[in-house]
Amino acid sequence: MQSRQVMALEARHFQPCFTRKPLAVARGKGSRVYDLEGKAYLDFIGSLGTCVVGHGNPVVLQAVKAQLGKIVSTSNLYYSEPQALLAKRLARVSGLGKSFFSNSGSESVEAALKLARKASGKKGIIATEHAFHGRTLGALSATSKEKYKAYCRPLVPGFKEIPFNDARALEKAIGADTAAFLVEPIQGEAGVLVPSEGYLQEVREICAKRDVLLILDEVQSGVARTGKFFAYQHEKILPDIVCTAKGLGNGFPIGATIAAAGIEFGKGDHGSTFGGNPLACAAALAVLDCIQEQGLEARAAEKGAWLAKALNAVMGPDSALQGVRGRGLMLGLGVQGGKADAVVDACRAQGLLVNGVGDDTIRLLPPLTVSLKECRQAVAVLEEALAV
């Protein structure tokens, strides 16, 4: 089947939820994907940050194949060895306690919200301006953009919004019924916005002092993306609950909600038929092996620093680039207003996939296994695409 046939089929039979680029991806290997016609693209959006150890990673592939030969799903009526092993590994890398497994980032946030209300006995949730936490009703209630939620109001009650990167605003917003503060350590969908150094430490102290749970949404920034397994580890704090997904299964659907000791659901408080199934957990365990054995936290920090420096060097009067922000291999390129989509299209024409966030930011989320040669290729294409 050709790409144009796939697009025509979708137009007839699939809900028109997505604003897609005219590209039908057929396969991937390492940092590259290939369309149905065989054209190669250097994938610097990494399937929206999910592909942390590269497309077709042999370690993940072998783990999934092996688990496929055993059993795919047991439901959660019974115990599962891969699930127990993954929960143990995540407790170690997070510094926290018990996990609940789901199938996506939105679900991991939903679980965190329910757990916070259960554990605290309170209902109020504080979130931040420009935040994105997912599309399900609870996660959407904490998401800032009105265009995502206007049509499905009323949403879940009890949510309050404050400015991002403003610890004093949090202190003022906390009331007697505040259960939790939900925040991204780096706001991805808002344009890769990094808060001031010390912000997470301040909100950690405020939440502890005021008996409010701190929930960190690391769906995008987690799994070694920023140079640490979790972005909060740069500031040497521990949240009460952390949500992650995307890169955890290297594209295989899995989400995790990890809580500190003593913050627990009771029997029947939450559930998921497919959450934490053996196949997803086998994939995630393989991802954790790759990160540890290949030193991918350090590689993300190193390659991200190289990219930021190389891209900053192309700024000037002949470039639409206005600055580079982010951490590790989670980078946002500020561009002149309205030019983001044109830059994305120009890059794709030259075989580089990047992502526009709004009209003034290009987002880069390449695999953590990306090579320096591939980084150089991406910078060369971006420099040409950003030329005004």
Image (tube, rainbow, N blue to C red):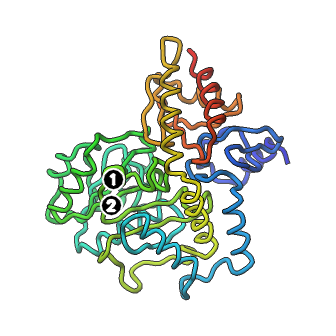
Q: Which residue is mark 1?
A: 183
Query: Can I make out residue 134 in this image?
Result: no
Alpha carbons under labels 1 and 2: distance apart: 6 Å
In the rendered image, the vertical position of residue 284 relative to residue 146, given as above or below: below
In the rendered image, the vertical position of residue 12 relative to residue 302, given as above or below: below
Task: Give the residue drawn at x 45%, y 65%.
Answer: 108
* Amino acid tagged 2: Ile
- Could you say which is closer to the camera, residue 20 or residue 348? 348
Q: Is residue 146 left or right of residue 340?
A: left
Q: Which residue is situated farthest in the right direction here?
A: 1
- Could you say which is closer to the camera, residue 265 or residue 301? 301
Secondary structure under badge 2? strand
Q: Which residue is mark 2?
A: 215
* Amino acid tagged 1: Val
Secondary structure under badge 1? strand
Query: Can I make out residue 172 in this image?
Result: yes
- Residue 29 percent location from the top left of the image: 73, 49
Query: Residue 324 appears in which quarter of the rendering?
Result: top left
Label 1–label 2 contact, CB within 8 A:
yes
In the rendered image, the vertical position of residue 101 relative to residue 59, given as above or below: below
Q: Is residue 255 left or right of residue 39?
A: left
Query: Residue 384 appears in which quarter of the rendering?
Result: top right
- Residue 367 percent location from the top left of the image: 60, 47
Task: Give the residue drawn at x 71%, y 63%.
Answer: 61
Query: Residue 255 bears which disc, if any?
Result: none
> Mark 1 or mark 2: which comes first in sequence?
1
- Residue 314 percent location from the top left of the image: 52, 20
- Residue 322 percent location from the top left of the image: 44, 22
Task: Give the residue drawn at x 59%, y 27%.
Answer: 343
Count of numbered labels shown in the rendering: 2
Task: Give the residue drawn at x 30%, y 65%.
Answer: 240
Number of residues whose C-alpha sits closer than 10 Å to that of mark 2, classed few (under 14), some (14–19) or many (20 or more): many
